[in-house]
Image (cartoon, helix red, strand yellow):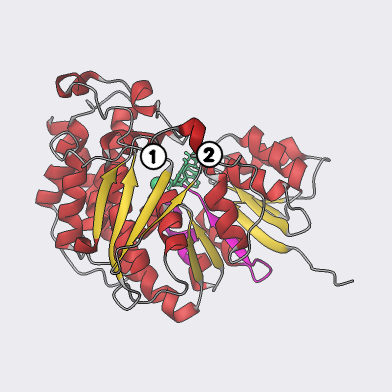
Amino acid sequence: MQVISPQHITVLGSTGSIGRSTLDVLARHPEKYSIFALTARERIAELAQQCRRFNPQFAVVTSDERAEELRALLLGESDTQVLSGVDGLCQVAADTRVEIVMAAIVGAAGLRPTLAAVNAGKKVLLANKEALVMAGPVFQQALSLSGAQLLPIDSEHNAIFQCLPYPCENLEAAGVEKILLTGSGGPFRTRAVAELHAVTPDEACAHPNWSMGRKISVDSATMMNKGLEFIEACYLFKARPEQIEVVVHPQSIVHSMVQYRDGSLLAQMGNPDMRTPIAHALAFPLRVDSGVPALDLITQGRLDFEAPDFSRFPCLRLAREAVDEGKSSPTVLNAANEIAVEAFLQGRLAFTNIAAVIEKVMNRAPVVELSGLETVEAIDLNARELARQALGAL
Ligand code: NAD
Ligand code: MG
């Protein structure tokens, strides 16, 4: 009998929504996957619980104080070694014993560890779209040098990946006419525009179909999430902006589509549960059980599609402008959005002013080439500062 040794995986952001779903899928296949490292910024008690259950070699937190807290919680209960800081994150992402890295930290904080995994040639499961949006050309160069494999976890991009031939280096050569990027339209798709000014963080985070972290939930409510995904799709699939169209699909059953020259339109469908794209990318090119029940189309009954409303969702327009402008514009857009969303979640900014802050920053930040990681980080820092100034001026 052939014994197959399990693949070792690091889960960056294991206490988050994607991190937990990843652990749920991994727990179904202990013979295939072994957890090497888990990481988190907050919810240290939950991280300790995960360490007791999965017994990883390493756990990484963001500060020395939290490392002490975790060590105290694990004392006498687990052999897991506790590291801290960005260096610790990069170390467990690049360790030679690791085959797979799940990049599920939210926001720019995931950039360095995700890039460390790419530079080390890992199979990288990318949930952390902000990292790619802010540093697309840097990722593309690192991928071509290291031979790492970047598999999309974002449900739309995972769907597009599934609808494309593999490998697909050139959309035109593959007969692709267009990528149709679907989005639900979020919780405010039909809300009176005049009411949007006063919506609360909890209302914005109450997504009709998906249960997600708070930052991406707000992005879904402004449709900046679709804007970031538009840019993500350009980088992942080497697509020009005019090859991608956003289609609003309120039920989140069709996760995206690819339209071919011969009139075929391929769609990937499934219940809105991130365990499907996670299981797909983990096992690719094989298929494993994800725990997600099969989609029942008869119960579902109908699927609706409509054009996006750019006046209701100015963030979508801003993202489109950023991708058309290229160079550092997506980096600036992402940084300003992170600051504006944080301010909204803290009750310091009205919902409709998220777009206003981003637009101000985009008008003020210079547009420059992205020559490397240091340039990206400098542009990101500058845009954050401009966003804080814009917040103060409102
Ligand atoms: P979340 O807020 O639920 O979890 C984020 C994780 O990252 C947590 O473990 C947190 O402790 C960690 N983290 C946060 N800030 C950190 C920092 N500064 N340094 C180190 N670790 C930090 O977020 P989520 O919803 O799981 O989303 C994670 C990523 O996946 C995001 O980029 C999001 O856009 C993307 N994504 C999420 C979903 C979803 O359904 N939740 C779907 C598609 C894409
Ligand atoms: Mg998505």
Residue 82 versus residue 184 in the image, above or below:
below
Residue 382 left/right relative to 217: left
Q: Is residue 296 visible in the rendered structure shown here? A: yes
Precedes in sequence: disc 1 or disc 2? 2
Instruction: Reply yes or no: does residue 102 show up in magenta.
Output: yes
Viewer-closest of 118 and 223: 223
Instruction: List the residue tagged with mark 2.
Output: 17
Amino acid bearing label 1: Ile
Residue at mark 2: C-beta within 8 A of ligand 1: yes
Residue 239 versus residue 362 in the image, above or below:
below
Mark 1 in CB contact with mark 2 (< 8 angstroms): yes
Residue 389 left/right relative to 265: left
Residue 186, given in percent of the width and then of the height, sits at 33, 33
Residue 64, given in percent of the width and then of the height, sits at 58, 45
Q: Secondary structure at mark 1?
A: helix
Where are the magenta residues, as a range? Answer: 95-115
Residue, x 30% and y 54% (percent of image)? 180
Residue 358, given in percent of the width and then of the height, sits at 18, 43
Viewer-closest of 386 and 34: 34
Instruction: List the residue tagged with mark 1.
Output: 216
Residue 159, given in percent of the width and then of the height, sits at 44, 55
Q: What is the spatial separation of the Cα atoms under label 1 and label 2, in whole angstroms?
A: 10 Å
Identity of the residue furthest to the left in this view = 363
Image mark for residue 352:
none
Q: Quadrant of the N terminus?
A: bottom right
Amino acid bearing label 2: Ser
